[in-house]
Image (cartoon, rainbow, N blue to C red):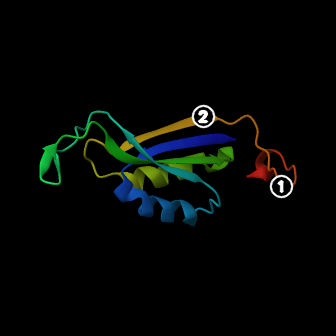
Amino acid sequence: MKKIEAIIRTSKFEEIHQCIAGLGVKFFTFYEVKGMGMEHPKPQTYRGVAYEPAYIPRTKIEIVTADEHVDEIIQCILSQGRTGEVGDGKIFVYEALSAYRIRNNDTGEIAL
């Protein structure tokens, strides 16, 4: 099993979600996050006062899946999340040693 973490543009979340759902992924977690990287935040105005935010809002997706589905999920994220501009995001893949379903003690890929 593998764990895929992707930090993406929030504006691309729905497109990526639809593509991943089309692959049959039944469960994933997502978070609204902030970060910094090569893209610089654009100045904004709040109540008439201009300021430059220190961090850029993004969405983080976490998916644990069987090894054979990793490549197609990554291709979904790459194809639907790409704008070609700095700040499109990153994908990380980790080894997931085990999984447990709390409700009925299923383990391994069955627990996914």
Q: Dots 1 and 2: beta carbons under 8 Å? A: no
Q: Residue at x 35, y 58 (%)?
A: 11
- Neighbour class for label 1 at 10 Å: few (<14), some, many (≥20)? few
- Neighbour class for label 2 at 10 Å: few (<14), some, many (≥20)? few
Horizontal placement of 99 versus 10: left or right? right
Quarter where residue 87 is shown: top left
Which is nearer the eye, 69 or 94? 94
Tell me the kind of residue under disc 1: Arg
Horizontal placement of 94 versus 50: left or right? right
Which is nearer the eye, 15 or 53? 53
What secondary structure is found at the residue carrying circle 1? loop
Q: Earlier in the sequence, mark 1 or mark 2?
A: 2
What secondary structure is found at the residue carrying circle 2? strand
- In front: label 1 or label 2: 1
Horizontal placement of 47 versus 91: left or right? left
Q: Residue at x 43, y 58 (%)?
A: 13
Q: Read off the residue under disc 1.
A: 103
Quarter where residue 104 is shown: bottom right
Q: Read off the residue under disc 2.
A: 94
The picture places residue 54, in percent across and down from the top left corner, at 27, 36
Q: Residue at x 58, y 62 (%)?
A: 23
Spatial CA span between label 1 and label 2: 25 Å
Which is nearer the eye, 14 or 20? 14
Q: Residue furthest front?
A: 47
The picture places residue 9, in percent across and down from the top left corner, at 36, 51
Q: Which mark is residue 56?
A: none
